[in-house]
Image (tube, rainbow, N blue to C red):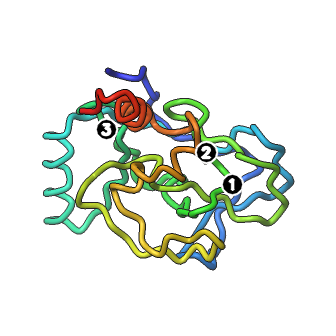
Amino acid sequence: MTPGSPGPDCWLNPLVRVGRSPIEGEGLFAAAPLPRGTAVARFGGRLVSDAELGRLFAEAARTGTYVDTMSVGRDVNLVLPPDVPNHTGNHGCDPNTWWADPFTVVARRDVERGEELTLDYATITDDPGFTMPCACRAASCRGRVTGADWRLPGLQAAYGDHWVPVLRQRITGSRTGLQR
């Protein structure tokens, strides 16, 4: 399934700023209060197959460049344009944003001015090789984020339908015995 076209560019709400993060490097911050449901970011770029993504990662390893990507469908991956501020969004185990549609992230709850905007990376990847330490400091911090976290029943319950399409389909399939 191809979840529609993301458009070539990324967008950030004008009330979102890049700043120094206590989680990691730079992060995205609310410059003003953001009510629950406010669009925070829209992701765009180029849709590529798993095979093409593998080639892009191999090239990036040779050249020392960074490829930011997320799964959006079966054998469909979104590769973000280089040098967009959307790259600076950090993971949080109790995030204040989540997915509203395949390419748009909204405030999960009311967000205060100055608060760092976070998204649970479990909602965007099922890559079995993905693993990273977590420094989000949430009470529910998992300590490590992996490409298998989408399988955690607690996350599935907490996020409901707020996953990228490929993971939402896998979760629904696992509940009905149709998982691929």
Q: Which residue is found at the position 23% from the left and 68% from the top? A: 64
Quarter holding residue 159: top right
Dot 1 crowding, Cα within 10 Å, few <14, some 14–19, many 20+: some
Q: Classify 36 as above or below 87.
A: above
- Asked if 20 appears above or below 177 in the picture, the reply is below
Task: Indicate which disc residue 96 carries.
Answer: 1
Of marks 2 and 3, the one in the foreground = 2
Disc 1, SS: loop
Residue 147 percent across, percent down from the top left:
33, 56
Q: Which mark is residue 32?
A: none
Name the mark nearer the viewer: 1 or 3.
1
Q: Residue at x 41, y 36 (%)?
A: 171
Q: Are marks 2 and 1 in contact (CB under 8 Å)?
A: no
Residue 168 at x, y percent in the picture? 44, 34
Q: CA distance from mark 2 to mark 1?
A: 7 Å
Classify mark 3: helix, strand or loop.
strand
Give the residue at x 57% y 54%: 119
Left or right of 56 in this view: 93: right
Locate residue 97 relative to residue 126 in the image: left or right.
Answer: right
For residue 36, above or below residue 117: above
Q: Which residue is mark 2?
A: 98
Res. 17 image quadrant:
bottom right
Mark 2 and mark 3: Cα distance apart in space: 18 Å
**Location of residue 105 by image quarter:** top right
The 10 Å Cα crowd at callout 3, few under 14, some 14 to 19, many 20 or more, is many
Q: Are marks 2 and 3 in contact (CB under 8 Å)?
A: no
Residue 104 in percent (x, y) is at 58, 36
Q: Which residue is mark 3?
A: 77
Identified by mark 1, the residue type is Asn
Q: Position of residue 93 (x, y in %)?
A: 57, 63
* Residue type highlighted by circle 2: Trp
**Marks 1/3: CA–CA distance:** 24 Å
